[in-house]
Image (cartoon, rainbow, N blue to C red):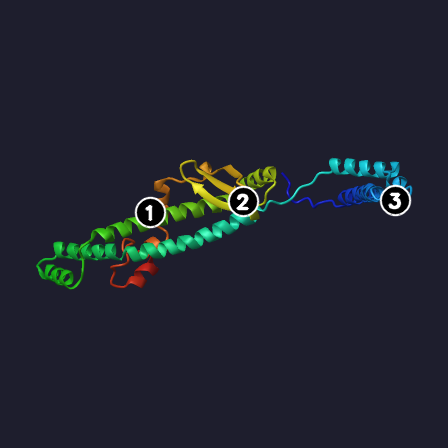
Amino acid sequence: MSVSVPLCATEIDDLVNTSQSIRDTFAYGIKTIAGGESYAGQGYIAPAMAKDGHITTEQQNAYNAAVSAVMAATYTYNPGAEEYFQDQADQAMNTVSEMIDAYVEAAQTIIMVATVNEMAQDAQSAPDEREAMALQEFMGANDVTLQDEEIEAYNDALSNTEQAIQVAAAYMAVANDEGLIDQANTMAFDLRVTYEEAASVFFDLATEAVWVSFDGGESIQGLQLGNYFVTADDVLGRAETQDFWLESPEGGCWFAEDYQECLNNGS
């Protein structure tokens, strides 16, 4: 569906003018009766005015022609799906950044576990117990045990970040897909609404679709995103080339003697 054809105002202008002409004449007729009736109750006789309140053939023909022109015209408008979903995608990516920050904060206790693990591996492979002594000293100087609330906070942060990423991906998929944008515009057009009137939008993982509700209560469902899903193996494979993984305690460089050099060398 094309949504970029501009409104042709000429026939609308003609309809406004011709219908207003009839309304003006109609108003004159109403006043003729209202005023004449009021004076009649007092015994005063109004002059012959009705003829000036008659609807003429010219008015009739002009109005009917304007009606026909409007009925024959094709009108459209841009519901604004492209701008809307791009804005939603941008906002969702900002939320992802916030969720990642929260995840990193919650992960500090798990990073401590990773540190203990590295030191324990060193002690395990050491020829004597000096590394074990260093590990013992480190654990004595730091809080390395895991509390229930710390595990809960980490798990929640991980799930919240995943959900935020999925939502952002869904909106980005719609924003970048001309076919889905056309579909979204068509749905809104059929409801005679614009996306400026959207009350809420959400991605539903169960139905693999984006839903939008509008101020009037109308809902759109049908922006199916099944073609945009990747597998867990895809995600894990892509992760190995991403800075968030490479710079993490599990990326291979965190515990290196020269962290930055390790990152620069890609190992």
| Residue drawn at (75%, 46%) of the image | 9
For label 1, the residue is: 159
Question: Upstream in the sequence, badge 3 or badge 1?
Answer: 3
Q: Do residues under tags 2 and 3 come within 8 Å of each other at their CB atoms? A: no
Disc 2 to disc 1, C-alpha distance: 31 Å
User: Which residue occupies the extreme left position in the image?
Assistant: 128
Q: Position of residue 72 (x, y in %)?
A: 75, 35
Q: In what element is the residue under mark 2? A: loop
Residue at image position (75%, 43%) is: 12
Instruction: Please tell me how crowded label 3 is: few (under 14), some (14-19), or many (20+) other residues with Cα within 10 Å.
Output: few
The location of residue 101, given as percent across then percent down, is: 35, 57
Q: What SS does tag 3 mark?
A: loop
Give the position of the C terminus as an image quadrant. bottom left
> Residue 73 shows which numbered tag?
none
What crowding class fits label 1: few (fewer than 14 Cα within 10 Å), some (14-19), or many (20 or more)? Answer: few
User: In the image, residue 266 lies at what x, y percent?
Assistant: 33, 56
Is residue 240 depicted above or below 255 in this figure?
above
Q: Secondary structure at mark 1?
A: helix
Q: Nearer the viewer, mark 3 or mark 1?
A: 3
Say which label, 2 or 3, has the lower sequence index. 3
Q: Is residue 246 visible?
A: no
Question: Mark 2 belongs to which amino acid?
Answer: Asp
Q: Nearer the viewer, mark 2 or mark 1?
A: 2
Pointer 2 local density, CA inside 10 Å: few below 14, some 14–19, many at least 20: few
Residue receiving disc 2: 215
Name the residue: 45% across, 44% down.
202
Question: Which residue was labeled with disc 3?
Answer: 44
Q: Residue furthest right?
A: 48
> Residue 54 is drawn in which quadrant?
top right
Quadrant where the N terminus sits is top right
Horizontal side of 127 relative to 10 (left or right) equals: left
Please name the amino acid that badge 1 sits on: Ser
